[in-house]
Image (spheres, rainbow, N blue to C red):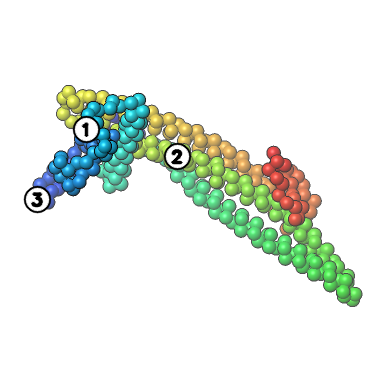
């Protein structure tokens, strides 16, 4: 990790003029100076006038927007409402200014890293855990997709078996010579439907748990990871800025800028350290929760599938009771939100 503040400055690209002469890049505070000039030389938005002679015309072409019937000879002092409006406008402008400066520095740092001219802070152990989490999430998303496909196929199979059982039962009534054969085939299909509904309930519970783990638990941790990565980029951007100022000439103006850069750098460093700790804690809890949830779900899935294909109806029902899974009867409506509370 690059903890040193006054380390080696990142290599900078030197743009070339059209005449072939090299020129130095402006300092990072060039944007700040431009914004300050805009604030000083910008127009007063509280005074409005219309130019009748075109842009850049003489002062005689200005038509005041006030009433033309009674020209005022005295200036009305600004009221409390005007002062409040100016204060709010100034605060908004400061927010936009800070955002612009921060975006400029972070973009510059990101491009420097992409082109190999800048250094970045790396926590190898944490980066490895984050990459492993992203890979695990992709694999669990694949399992989730396959589980949903299995649920759809089981549902279609149940519908077919139910229709086939009804057809056998109807034919057993209309074919006396084959009544017995059609009869036990109809009973077999009904039994398969009953066991299939039990298996479908177990698979639905398995898929729902995987979905919660992937879309909520893992996603929440990855959101914290994104905040950590953004804080890391800001930290490196202001670290690089501080290093460049430290290597420059020392005078009265530079000393003040250096102290301001030091304070800003320290604030971003504290934010980076805090988020790094948060990510480490969330990764640890996520791993523990994942093992606990998947141990239960994989045992459920194995027992349910094994009992279904072995034709063991009793074991299949015991599996659902073991994991507290309640099946809704076919055609039952979904309970209201009051009943679920």
Q: Residue at horizontal 70%, vertical 63%?
A: 157
Q: Which residue is mark 1?
A: 40
Q: Secondary structure at mark 2?
A: helix
Q: Residue at x 51, y 35 (%)?
A: 282
- Near mark 2 (Cα within 10 A), the count class, few <14, some 14-19 or many ≥20, is many
Q: Which mark is residue 12?
A: none
Q: Name the residue nearer the viewer: 182 or 103.
A: 103
Instruction: Return the mark for residue 19.
Output: 3
Task: Specify whether 138 is left or right of 71.
Answer: right
Q: Is residue 38 visible?
A: no
Q: Give the distance between the C-alpha atoms of the residues marked 1 and 2, in whole angstroms.
A: 41 Å
Label 3: element kind = loop
Q: Residue furthest front?
A: 69
Name the secondary structure under disc 1.
Answer: helix
Residue hosting label 2: 225
The residue at the point 80 percent across, 59 percent down is: 191
Report the quarter where the N terminus lies.
top left
User: Could you tell which of marks 3 and 1 lies nearer the N-terminus?
Assistant: 3
């Amino acid at each position: 990790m690059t903890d040193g503040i006054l380390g080696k400055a990142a290599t900078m690209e030197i743009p070339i003029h059209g005449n072939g002469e090299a020129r130095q890049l402006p300092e990072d505070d060039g944007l700040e100076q431009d914004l300050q000039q805009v604030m000083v030389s910008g127009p007063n938005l509280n005074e409005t006038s219309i130019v009748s002679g075109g842009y850049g015309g003489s002062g005689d072409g200005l038509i005041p927007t006030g009433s033309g019937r009674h020209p005022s000879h005295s200036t009305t002092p600004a009221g409390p409402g005007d002062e409040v409006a100016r204060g709010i406008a100034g605060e908004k402008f400061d927010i936009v200014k800070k955002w612009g400066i921060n975006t400029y520095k972070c973009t510059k740092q990101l491009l420097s890293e992409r082109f190999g001219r800048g250094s970045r802070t790396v926590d190898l152990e944490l980066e490895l855990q984050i990459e492993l989490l992203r890979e695990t999430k992709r694999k669990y998303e694949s399992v989730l997709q396959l589980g949903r496909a299995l649920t759809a196929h089981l549902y279609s199979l149940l519908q077919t078996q139910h229709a086939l059982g009804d057809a056998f039962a109807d034919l057993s009534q209309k074919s006396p010579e084959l009544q017995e054969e059609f009869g036990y085939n109809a009973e077999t299909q009904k039994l398969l439907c009953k066991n299939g509904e039990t298996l479908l309930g177990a698979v639905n519970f398995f898929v729902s748990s995987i979905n919660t783990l992937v879309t909520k638990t893992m996603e929440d941790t990855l959101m914290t990871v994104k905040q950590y990565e953004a804080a890391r980029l800001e930290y490196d951007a202001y670290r690089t800025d501080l290093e460049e100022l430290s290597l420059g000439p020392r005078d009265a103006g530079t000393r003040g800028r250096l102290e301001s850069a030091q304070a800003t750098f320290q604030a971003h460093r504290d934010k980076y350290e805090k988020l790094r700790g948060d990510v480490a804690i969330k990764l640890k809890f996520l791993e523990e929760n994942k093992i606990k949830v998947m141990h239960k779900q994989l045992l459920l899935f194995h027992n349910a599938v094994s009992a279904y294909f072995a034709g063991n109806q009793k074991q299949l029902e015991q599996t659902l009771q073991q994991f507290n899974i309640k099946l809704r009867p076919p055609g039952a409506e979904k309970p209201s939100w009051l009943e679920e509370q």
